[in-house]
């Protein structure tokens, strides 16, 4: 298994990670590698929050496109980050830490944001490449409805975040949602429950 890290200024994260077919086939437990082709495009990788302003706006628009009544709780703070394009930034994005000297000019203060949203009795939180949704006030998805929903949407709307889905045996109080189509289907289901 080989990995090749290519630094690429045009890539959204500053690098490309190339992996062999053999390694890709062994990544099945990583839900971001699930094949959801034909059923919907995956959400873009935003990284875990807190987010910079542009990524916050991306996440907010994803949710408001299907759930305009969502109430947002947005908090901000200032953190020090590596400047995009600096050598420490590129190395950190490639998973290599401590391999170069960090100079004062490599660091900048950045305003970052955390966001939680509430609607339809559920909490919504944007994570790495998916929406994490959890019941807020006891309105879990009844077992039979969750089973039926899981049969159609289980690869895109993962019960309690299980990679590859799971067998529904009781009411469901959490999902990880990987696609815009899955988010729309989930919101449609919540409106009916």
Image (cartoon, rainbow, N blue to C red):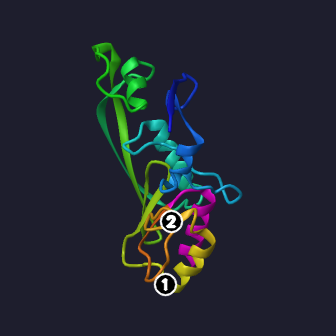
Q: Position of residue 150 (x, y in %)?
A: 56, 74
Position of 53 relative to 105 (above/below): below
Left or right: where 183 falls relative to 172: right
At 52% from the left and 79% from the top, the residue drawn is 146
Left or right: where 127 falls relative to 22: left
Residue found at the far bottom of this picture = 144
SS for dot 2? strand
| Quadrant in the picture for residue 101 | top left
At 55% from the left and 59% from the top, the residue drawn is 68
Q: Provide the residue span drawn in magenta.
A: 177-193
Q: Nearer the viewer, residue 164 or 25?
A: 25
Position of 113 relative to 93 (above/below): below
Q: Residues within 10 Å of mark 2 (few under 14, many from 20)?
A: many
Q: Position of residue 55 (x, y in %)?
A: 48, 40
Q: Nearer the viewer, residue 56 or 151?
A: 151
SS for dot 1? helix
Q: Is residue 181 magenta?
A: yes
Q: Which mark is residue 158?
A: 2
């Amino acid at each position: 298994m080989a990995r090749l890290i290519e630094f690429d200024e045009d890539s959204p994260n500053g690098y490309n990670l190339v992996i062999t077919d053999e390694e890709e086939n062994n990544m099945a437990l990583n839900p971001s590698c699930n094949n959801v082709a034909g059923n919907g495009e995956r959400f873009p990788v935003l990284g875990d929050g807190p987010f910079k302003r542009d990524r916050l706006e991306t996440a907010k628009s994803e949710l408001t496109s299907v759930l305009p009544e969502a109430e947002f709780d947005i908090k901000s703070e200032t953190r020090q980050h590596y400047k995009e394009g600096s050598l420490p930034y590129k190395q950190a994005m490639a998973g290599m830490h401590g391999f170069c000297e960090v100079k004062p000019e490599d660091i900048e203060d950045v305003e970052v944001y955390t966001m939680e949203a509430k609607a339809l009795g559920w909490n919504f939180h944007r994570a790495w490449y998916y929406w994490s949704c959890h019941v807020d006030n006891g309105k879990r998805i009844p077992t039979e409805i969750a089973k039926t929903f899981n049969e159609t949407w289980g690869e895109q709307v993962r019960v309690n975040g299980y990679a590859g889905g799971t067998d529904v045996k009781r009411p469901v109080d959490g999902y990880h949602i990987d696609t815009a189509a899955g988010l729309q289907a989930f919101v449609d289901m919540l409106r009916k429950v």
